[in-house]
Amino acid sequence: MLKKKTLITGLSAVMLTGGAFGAEAFSDTQSVHAAAASKSENQSAKKLVNSLYQSAFNGEMPQNVKGLKINESTRQDVYDKIGEPEQKADSRNPFDLYSWNMGNPGYGFSYHKNGKISEIRYFGTGVERRLNLGSVTPDILSKQIGSADKILTVPKTGETDYVYHTGQYELHFVIGSDQKADHVNLKAR
């Protein structure tokens, strides 16, 4: 009878504390998963930054809108490639807006009076954002593409705008107060 009571007390202690090895193993497993997730986010951010930066030299954004160029492509070219926007430009917002969906990034297009693209805005994805634009930080920008040519403050929002000159174009990484990219703008210099 004494042995049974000792065994039950011992099992209760193990269950309450996680055991001598169980708690450590669990916490080590969490660390390994967190490190792997962080490395994956970091790799995604690096790949995205490089892709955006390289495409900017051609006056375009990568992925779904590749080939649509600043000062060359028209509103009709955009509509032909990705359809009509969910929200058209108006007096309050100069961008035709395309929302993210099913892992596809969101975009905004602003046009000159002649109908050619003046600016492309990249919003990233909503689902798994931390594996996309949400993992881009000033540190990643610095390590991947160097120091910004200009650093500005966005007046209405207080966000920080890291501006990179890419030939005839400027690539703007707009960073929020959380030190993560909110969106990216591309326009002619």
Image: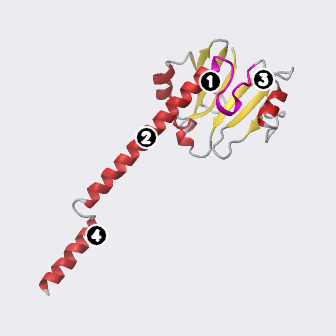
Label 2 packing within 10 angstroms: few (<14), some (14-19), many (20+) = some
Q: Residue 121 lies in what quarter of the image?
A: top right
1 vs 2, front mark: 2
* Mark earlier in primary sequence (3, 2): 2
Residue that sits furthest to the right in the current view: 114
Whether the residues at callouts 3 and 4 have beta carbons within 8 Å, the answer is no
At x 49%, y 18%, the residue is 146
Q: Which residue is mark 1?
A: 172
Q: Position of residue 88 (x, y in %)?
A: 82, 37
Q: Which residue is mark 4?
A: 15
In the picture, measured across the screen, residue 79 lies left or right of residue 63, that is right
The segment highlighted magenta reads 56-70
For residue 38, which numbered disc appears in the image? 2
Q: Position of residue 36 (x, y in %)?
A: 40, 43
Label 1 packing within 10 angstroms: few (<14), some (14-19), many (20+) = many
Residue that sits furthest to the top in the current view: 167
Whether the magenta-drawn stretch holds residue 140 is answered as no
* Mark earlier in primary sequence (1, 4): 4
Question: Distance of mark 3 from mark 2, alpha carbons?
Answer: 36 Å
Whether the magenta-drawn stretch holds residue 62 is answered as yes
Question: Distance of mark 1 from mark 4, alpha carbons?
Answer: 53 Å
Question: Distance of mark 1 from mark 2, alpha carbons?
Answer: 24 Å
Q: Which residue is mark 3?
A: 117
